[in-house]
Image: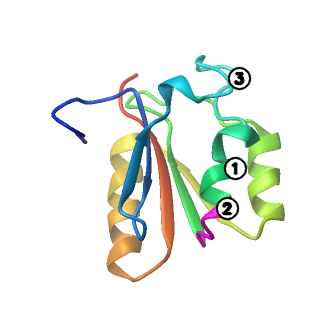
Amino acid sequence: MQTQGKAPRLKFYLHEQRAERDWRKRLATHLHTPGVQPADVEEVVKKGVQTLVIGRGMSEALKVPPSTLEYLEKQGIDVRVLQTEQAVKEYNALVAQGVRVGGVFHSTC
C-alpha cells in the first residue's frame, strides 16, 4: 500500500471518491491504544459508505475500541476489523462487488 511513493502508517481510502489521506496528523490519538476513535472515522461516515474495513496493522497492534464500533453500527455501517493484509483483501473484494466501501489501514505493526 503506497501513496506518492511512501508507505504511511495509517491511511484512509474511500474507493468511490478516489480519495486517500494520510491521517497521521488528523487522528484523535496517535497511539495504538486507545486506537481508532469515533472522531477518526467521522469523515468516512459522512461520505455514506455501506462498509468500513479497518486494518489493525501487520501484528494487529492498533486497537478499535467498542465505542468506535458502536458509533459505526449506529450509523448503519457494516464494520470489518482485520489484520491489515486480510483487510486489504477484504476491501478489494468488496470494491469488486460494487459495495460502497471505505477503509482505514494501519500499514505497520
Instruction: Say which residue appears at 58% left-offset and 18% top-offset.
Output: 30
Q: Could you say where residue 42 lies in the image, as x and y percent from the top left?
A: 69, 50
Q: Earlier in the sequence, mark 3 or mark 2?
A: 3
Q: Could you say where residue 105 lies in the image, as x and y percent from the top left?
A: 44, 41
Above or below, comparing residue 3 to residue 91 in the picture: above
Using the image, tell me which numbered label, if any, was put on residue 34.
3
Q: Quadrant of residue 62?
A: top right
User: CB of mark 3 within 8 Å of CB of mark 2?
Assistant: no
Whether the magenta-drawn stretch holds residue 65 is answered as: no
Q: Could you say where residue 100 lies in the image, as x and y percent from the top left?
A: 50, 74
Q: What element carries label 3?
A: loop
Amino acid found under the numbered disc labelled 3:
Pro
Which one is in front in this view, the residue at disc 3 or the one at disc 1? 1
User: CB of mark 1 within 8 Å of CB of mark 2?
Assistant: yes
How far apart are labels 3 and 2 at the CA level?
23 Å
Using the image, tell me which numbered label, if any, was put on residue 42.
1
How far apart are labels 3 and 1 at the CA level?
17 Å
Q: What count of labels does the image hold? A: 3
- Location of the N terminus by quadrant is top left
Q: Which of marks 3 and 1 is nearer the N terminus?
A: 3
Amino acid found under the numbered disc labelled 1:
Glu
Seen from this angle, which residue lies furthest left? 5
Q: Which of 58 and 107 is in front in this view?
A: 107
Q: In which quarter of the image is residue 93?
A: bottom left
Q: Which residue in the protein does label 2 denote?
A: 46
Q: Is the magenta region chiefly helix, strand or loop? A: loop
Amino acid found under the numbered disc labelled 2:
Lys
Q: What stretch is highlighted in magenta?
A: 46-50
User: CB of mark 3 within 8 Å of CB of mark 1?
Assistant: no
Instruction: Say which residue appears at 15% left-offset and 33% top-offset.
Output: 5
Above or below, comparing residue 73 to residue 21 in the picture: below
